[in-house]
Image (cartoon, rainbow, N blue to C red):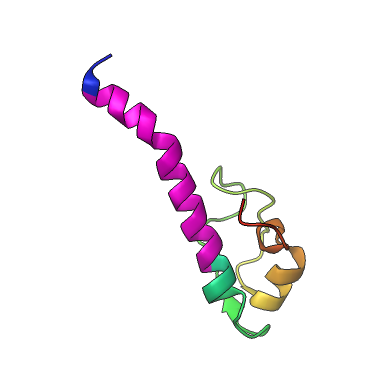
Amino acid sequence: MSARAYAHRVTLPTYRAELASRLYDSLRDKLLPLPDDTLVYPAHGAGSLCGRNLSKETVSTIGEQRRSNYALQAMSRD
């Protein structure tokens, strides 16, 4: 394995943790404070490999997502 490939393998977990931390902050600090009637449009359709439990709906609200989306349920940063 080249030194460059090795360096990328070593830093990947750190990079993932940083991305996860940014996503957590965005959800908690930017999206969840929005009013319940704020419209939300999905970035991926049902059946996409990018998500879990995607709905066939083409629009939702922050309130509905707050109630039904597993990623928006109370959880610790870790």
State whether residue 2 is above or below residue 25: above
Q: Where is residue 41 in the image (x, y as percent from the top left)?
A: 55, 70
In the image, taking residue 16 as reference, residue 45 lies left or right, namely right
Looking at the rendering, which quadrant does residue 12 occupy?
top left
Label total for image = 0
Looking at the rendering, which quadrant does residue 15 occupy?
top left
The verdict on residue 41 being magenta is no
Q: Residue at x 52, y 65 (%)?
A: 25
* Foreground pick, 18 / 54: 18
State whether residue 77 is above or below residue 33: above
Q: Where is residue 3 in the image (x, y as percent from the top left)?
A: 23, 21
Q: Where is residue 55 in the image (x, y as percent from the top left)?
A: 68, 58
Q: Residue at x 36, y 35 (%)?
A: 11
Q: Where is residue 63 in the image (x, y as percent from the top left)?
A: 71, 77
The chief SS type of the magenta part is: helix
Q: Which residue is drawn at 72% across and 62% down?
A: 73
* Foreground pick, 44 / 78: 78
Q: Residue furthest top?
A: 1
- Quarter of the picture holding the N terminus: top left
In the image, which residues are magenta?
4-26
State whether residue 23 is above or below residue 32: above
The verdict on residue 8 being magenta is yes
